[in-house]
Amino acid sequence: MTVDPKLIKELREITGAGILECKKALEESGGDIEKAKQYLKERGVAIAAKKMTRQAREGIIEAYIHTGSKVGAMVELNCETDFVARTDLFRNLAHDIAMQVVAFNPLYIKPEDIPPEVIEAKKAEILSEYKGSGKSQEELEKIVEKRLEEYYREVCLLRQPFLRDENSTVEEVITQAIAKLGENVVVRRFVRFELGEPLE
């Protein structure tokens, strides 16, 4: 099918994808913008999945100090090349992630970083709430699984709703950036400071 150049331009402005990618997406979706957006999103996730195994040793350290200078954060965001580390997209992402750390106060990057004893204590805490409830083992396991997912969304940076778009997680936003940049992008570490907080 012949795709209207205006539609290609519109899709490109919405998604930031290349002209050829937008043209193909619109061809595949019969000229439907919403379907084309979904096509690009799925394709971006597939591309990103392939790149996520690659080493990311370049990048930047980004700092964000909130208004009033009472709370701030530093984030190390890695990519594969110095060229990508200098792009606006990468730098803006690092800045947004530093803001995310200040606003949402995550404790870990991903669920795998949570110490096993913390997970076990959380499970015990959840199960204690249902003691004597008469629920079956299977029901209790489902409850624990659901509550742990909620806990991950609170304490793990990558699982948190992204501060600029609560319909996406930080992980999904990074995946979209990987697809656009063509390189692996990894949050290596972060630290958050709040004035007057006790030292560990």
Image (cartoon, rainbow, N blue to C red):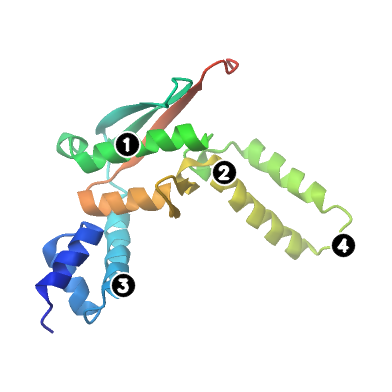
Q: Quadrant of residue 144?
A: bottom right
* Foreground tag (1 vs 3): 3
Q: Where in the figure is residue 117, as x and y percent of width and height? A: 66, 36
Q: Amino acid at mark 4?
A: Gly
Asked if 28 appears above or below 95 in the picture, the reply is below
Instruction: Name the disc covering residue 134, or none.
Output: 4
* SS type, badge 3: helix
Sequence-wise, which precedes: disc 3 or disc 4? 3
Sequence-wise, which precedes: disc 2 or disc 1? 1
Q: Which residue is pictured at 12% across the width and 76% down the height?
A: 4
* Foreground tag (4 vs 2): 2
Q: Amino acid at mark 1?
A: Ala
C-alpha gap between disc 4 and disc 1: 48 Å
Residue 154 seen in this snapshot: yes
C-alpha gap between disc 3 and disc 2: 31 Å
Write down the residue under mark 1: 94
C-alpha gap between disc 2 and disc 1: 20 Å
* SS type, badge 1: helix
Write down the residue under mark 2: 154
Packing grade of label 3 (10 A; few <14, some 14-19, many >=20) is few
Q: Nearer the viewer, residue 196 or 156?
A: 196
C-alpha gap between disc 1 and disc 3: 28 Å
Q: Amino acid at mark 3?
A: Glu
* Foreground tag (3 vs 4): 3
Q: Which residue is pictured at 52% across the width and 17% down the height?
A: 195
Write down the residue under mark 3: 34
